[in-house]
Image (cartoon, grey):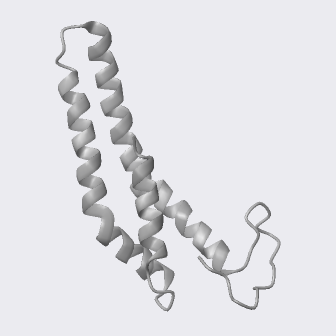
Amino acid sequence: VGVDNMCILVHALKRQSLELPLEERVGNALSEVGPSITLASLSEVLAFAVGSFIPMPACRVFSMFAALAVLLDFLLQVTAFVALMTFDFIRTEENRVDCFPCITVRPTASGLEH
């Protein structure tokens, strides 16, 4: 639950034209896939919220916590994950190593693919 939204966001950002500034690419990607991931997450929250009306206490508590967890997951995806994804694309464009971002490498002859 929620991991597919992250994959959709990353894929949408990778599909953007590299000629555009990064801020515009992120905005275009969010406007492209934002409605679909919002609808998917809200339907998951609603499905778990309906489960909170079950008379069994264990299922009711699980459903309430799951609805809250999916909602918080969505909020973090559209805020923190997008920011971290942007930082990673900046790192990639500056030819920095992923584990040691203070080290830069020369691009290959074919160029770096994002």
Q: Residue furthest front?
A: 110
Q: Quadrant of residue 52?
A: top left
Q: Which quarter of the rendering shows the C terminus? A: bottom right
Q: Residue at x 41, y 81 (%)?
A: 24
User: Could you say which is closer to the camera, residue 97 or residue 114?
Assistant: 114
Q: Is residue 51 left or right of residue 30?
A: left
Q: Quadrant of residue 104?
A: bottom right
Q: Residue at x 80, y 63 (%)?
A: 100
Image x and y of residue 56, in percent: 24, 7
Image x and y of residue 89, in percent: 58, 72
Q: Which quarter of the rendering shows the N terminus? A: top left
User: Could you say which is closer to the camera, residue 15 or residue 57?
Assistant: 15
Residue 26 drawn above or below residue 66: below
Q: Residue at x 49, y 92 (%)?
A: 19
Residue 26 drawn above or below residue 35: below
Count of all numbered marks drawn on residues in the image: 0
Q: Quadrant of residue 12?
A: bottom left
Image x and y of residue 3, in percent: 45, 48
Residue 52 drawn above or below residue 26: above
Q: Residue at x 22, y 29 (%)?
A: 49
Q: Is residue 97 left or right of residue 52?
A: right
